[in-house]
Each structure stands twice: as structure tokens, then as C-alpha cells.
Amino acid sequence: LPPAHTLSFDFERGLEISRYWDLEYEPKHAGSDEELTDRLEQEIVDSLRAHMIADVPIGAFLSGGLDSTLVVALLAKFVLDEPIQTFSGSLKYREFDEAPAARAVAERYGTIHRERAIEPSLLRLLPMLVAQLDEPSDPLAICSYLIAGFAREHVKVALGGDGGDELFGGYDRYYGNRFAGIYALLPKAFRERVLGAWLRESDGGGWYKSRTHQLKWLHQLSFLEGGERYAASLGYFYFLGHEGEDLLTPEFRAQLAGADPAAPIVAAYENARAEHPIDRMLHADSQLRMPDHPVMILDRMTMAHGLEARSPFLDHKLAEFAARLPMRLKVRGRSLRRVQRALARRHLPPELLRRPKQGFSSALPYMLRDEYALLFKLFLENASLVSERIVQKDAVGRLLAEHRAGRADHGNRLWLLLNAELWYRIVIGKVAHEELSAAIAEARTHSSGAH
């Protein structure tokens, strides 16, 4: 069922799916920035008190990012009389390692802090992760699985910071969509014939957040509006539009019968009880991306270890309050989640607030580059999705060749294909994930011997 819906049945009307609750973004709260920050602080504290009710040991994830550190700080200052256990993972790549920031917060608030070096491995974990998730995986699942296993050695419940980005406006795509609207003010013919031709000839390789990719993203969005623009902004590195048409076989496209994967995003944007475009984006994320992606991954990866995860930011009363915060306290220009940062300045070290947003799984493409290459070779060069006439062999080959040569960053698309291939073999082909893991181990041995 979609979030906040029920399914009912009676003999006259049959099955009915209906919504019982939704976020309302209007009317906006009145008050000064300081007054509204005070109210937000109290709302979060109330949620934390409710989430600390348990008859088993409770801990908290402490990544070093804004959300989890704020949860721990407010717990220590306003809710708990005893130190809480906190858990973080450290990574070898210093520029991506959030452990020092987590350590600083733990020291400030006297938590019982536990830290473990995280050495993720796709080769060892990926088939099992796909089986545990029951759907194609995401790099975030690897880190979530490992840190959840660490926490479960000490506690049975762990609090996290999920939901902060979607409540307060934490993604750069929120202001990026508005920049696309400004770019769209240029004459359409000029954008198509001059700028479009230049961008098509520009090097699309390198990092996916390169300036060239940002310009291509803006260019693509400038020809769309409203919910269609937002859906496209989420799908730039995936298989929406012509990328999907090029990938899928004509037979499989016929079976889809015109199904539009962007339609639910467009509907959630257009149907939001909101006036501001960014509030509409936040609503779409709260209805689709958040429950289907980070919350789903957190739930399944923690429960794989028998650990219960709780997300205080996702309390419905707190979400209702945050939805009606004025836009000046969410996103202004390129400044994101302004009210959350104002609250954090009261409780967190200044150096933590200056750190760029990165996410726990940001280092994986760098740490696991060789493993990605081996998995692509093992599962995509002779994919079941190709032999079953779902995707086209030439399209997969082109993606692999361009990515390996550095002509384009297809990392996200190849990751999706790899996971879809593993899921297909496990669920449709009935191949045990242990058997796939054994095949990976054998290929790894041969690869190491060749070197």
C-alpha cells in the first residue's frame, strides 16, 4: 500500500484503497525564526521521549552527519539521565570518514561510544543483501548492514536520524530545480540548437557531480515543468526517458504497455497540499523516495540482525509541524535546511556544521572500484536479463565500454543493472544467493591469480 493508506473490503463495493492522513504545508506557522526554532526543538524532544520507551537496551547510530548528531545531542541534554550507547563506523578514506566528527559529539555529551572500522565488500555481501532486501540493493545497504550488526552486539533498539533531509530540505536538487526554471527563461531555440549541441559534445566522463553533468541536468530539466521536471531531476542517472527505451527490448517494452515509472512522482508533486514548489518536492519525497528507499533499507538491514531501528524525525506530529515551517527556514538560495542548522548551532561543535554533506556510502565507489569491475564482468557481460529478452545486449555493452573508458559516468545505471540481474537470478531463476556468492569467490580467486 502507499504510505498512509488503508485497504478495505465489503461485498458491495469490493476492494477499496483510501488515504487516511497526509501532510499539509499550509497555512504556514507564524513567528520569528528564533521562536520557530524553539518550537522545533521542543517537537524533536517530545518525539525523542516517545521513542525512548522500551524494556530493552537502546542505543543510537552516530554517523557524524547533522541528523544523527542532533538526535544524540538533544537526547543527552533534555531526555536522558544516563549516558546512551552510540555506534559509528570509520572508513579508510579520510576525506569520507565521518568517525572523527562522531567522536567529537560523543565526547561532548559523554556517550558510551563504540567505533568500528568498516571494510565493506560487495563481493562478500551483495547476493545476500539482495536476498535480504527482497529487491535490488543500493550501496547504502552495505554500510547499514555492517553498522547494524555492530550495534546489535550491544543493544536491541537503535535510534537514527532518517528523515531530516525530507523534512527540512536537505538535498541540492531542491534549489537545483529552481535554477532549472531560471535557465528555462532562455529562448527554447537557443537552448536546443546552441547550448544543447555544445553539451552533447562536452565530455560526460569523470565524476557524476562534475560541472558538465550539472549543466546537462539543468538543460534536460529546462524543457519540463512542475512534477514532470521534478521526476526527471530524480531520474537523470537512471533509466527514465530515452535511456530506458534504449535499454529495454521491443518485446519487453510492449509488455509494459506504456507504463510510466515517473507517474507516481508527478502525482505526489501535483497533489501536494502545498503552494511552494520546494514543499511539493518535499511531499513527493515523503510519499515515495523516503519510504521506498532509505527507510526500507534501514528497516530490512537492521532486522536482518534482529535490531529494531527507530527514526524520531519521522514521528507524524513532528512531520506535521515541519511541513508548515516557512520556506525561509527550509531552503533559501543554495542554503539548505536552515532551521535545522540554526538548532544545531545551539548544540553541536562549529566545526561539524562546516563539514560538507557526504553520506555514509559516499566512499564506496572509490573503495570498491575493483570489485565493481569484477561484478560487472561476471554478471553483466552474460546477463540473464539479456538472454530472457528483457534488456538489449548492445545497450549493456555500450554502457560498460563507455564507463570503463571514462567517457561517461554510468556507475548508477550499471549498479541498477547489476542488482536487477542478481535479483532476477535469485527470485525468478531460483538460484540460491549462496551459490552466487560462491561464483563470485571463485572469480575473485582467478582474478587474483591472473595478477
Image: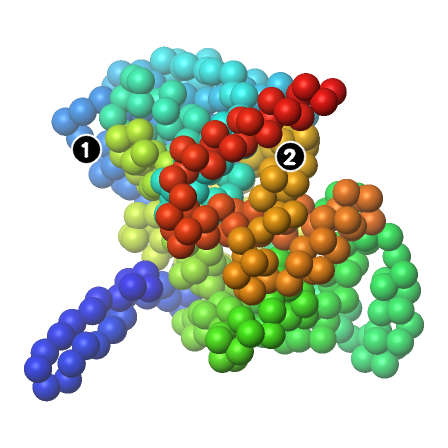
Give how far across and how far down residue 292 sits, in percent.
Answer: 41, 54
Judge by depth and name the residue closer to the eye, 136 or 41. Answer: 136
Question: If the image is split into quadrants, where does the N terminus sit?
Answer: bottom left
Q: Earlier in the sequence, mark 2 or mark 1?
A: 1
Q: Which residue is drawn at the image coordinates 49% and 80% (left, top)? A: 257
Q: Could you say whether the residue bearing mark 1 is in a helix, strand or loop?
A: loop
Local packing at callout 2 (Cα closer than 10 Å; few below 14, some 14-19, many 20+) is some
Residue wearing tag 1: 53
Residue placed most toward the observer, 43 or 375: 375
Q: Is residue 450 left or right of residue 43?
A: right
| Residue type, mark 1 in image | Ile
Q: Callout 2: helix, strand or loop? A: helix
Residue at 52% across, 33% down: 439
Which quarter of the picture shows residue 92? Answer: top right
Three-letter code for the amino acid on which mark 2 is drawn: Leu
Identity of the residue drawn at 20% across and 69% down? 7
Front-most of 332 and 246? Answer: 246
Q: Position of residue 64 (x, y in %)?
A: 52, 27
Q: Which residue is mark 2?
A: 374
Q: List x then y, in percent, for residue 57.
A: 22, 22
Image vertical order of residue 417 relative to residue 392, above or below: above
Residue shown at 15% from the left, 81% from the top: 14
Which color scheme is applied? rainbow
